[in-house]
Image (cartoon, rainbow, N blue to C red):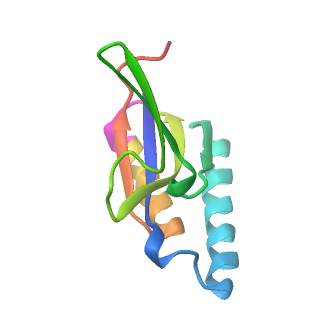
């Protein structure tokens, strides 16, 4: 089963201090390598800040395009992983490792299906 693990960040406190940034990249790289070695890694990546987002809405036959994030909230999606594991318990195991490495919350959600 495929799971999305969303890296939740508070953009008001980023970026990490320089000394912490290098250590964070090292921890995240180690967890990424561990997931690849375990065969659960599908793909993942970091995202640019939410103010770089473009939102497309289609309502009543009209399309609107606006700048910025869809939701005004303190927490934003800063990156993500897609993993393939047998069940939620295994996904939560990897989410715990990612949360420790990134030092931010990780939201875990199963895919309904893969096209």
What is the total number of numbered labels drawn onto the structure image? 0
Q: Residue at x 66, y 61 (%)?
A: 30
Q: Residue 15: name its quadrant.
A: bottom right
Q: Residue at x 56, y 58 (%)?
A: 49
Q: Quadrant of the N terminus?
A: top left
42 is higher (above) or lower (below) than 23: above
Choose between 88 and 23: the one closer to the eye.
23
Report the magenta residues as a range.
86-90
Q: Residue at x 62, y 83 (%)?
A: 20
Q: Is residue 88 magenta?
A: yes
Mostly what secondary structure, the magenta segment?
helix
| Residue 41 can be seen, yes or no | yes
Q: Residue 58: name its quadrant.
A: top left
| Residue 1 can be seen, yes or no | no
Where's residue 38, x and y in %?
Answer: 61, 42
Where's residue 59, x and y in %?
Answer: 31, 21
Where's residue 84, x and y in %?
Answer: 50, 31
Left or right relative to 12: residue 36: right
Q: Is residue 89 magenta?
A: yes
Choose between 67 and 69: the one closer to the eye.
67
15 is higher (above) or lower (below) than 88: below
Where's residue 60, x and y in %?
Answer: 29, 15
Q: Residue at x 60, y 57 (%)?
A: 31
Left or right relative to 99: residue 108: left
Choose between 53 and 41: the one closer to the eye.
53
């Amino acid at each position: 089963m495929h799971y999305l693990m969303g890296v939740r960040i508070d953009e008001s406190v980023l970026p990490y201090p320089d000394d912490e940034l290098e250590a964070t990249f090292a921890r995240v790289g180690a967890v990424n390598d561990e997931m690849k070695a375990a065969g659960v890694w599908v793909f993942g990546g970091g995202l640019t800040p939410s103010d770089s987002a473009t939102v497309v809405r289609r309502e009543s036959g009209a399309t609107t395009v606006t700048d910025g994030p869809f939701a005004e909230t303190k927490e934003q999606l800063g990156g993500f992983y897609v993993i393939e594991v047998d069940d939620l318990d295994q996904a939560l195991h990897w989410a715990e490792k990612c949360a420790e490495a990134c030092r931010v919350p990780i939201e875990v959600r199963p895919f309904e299906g893969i096209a």
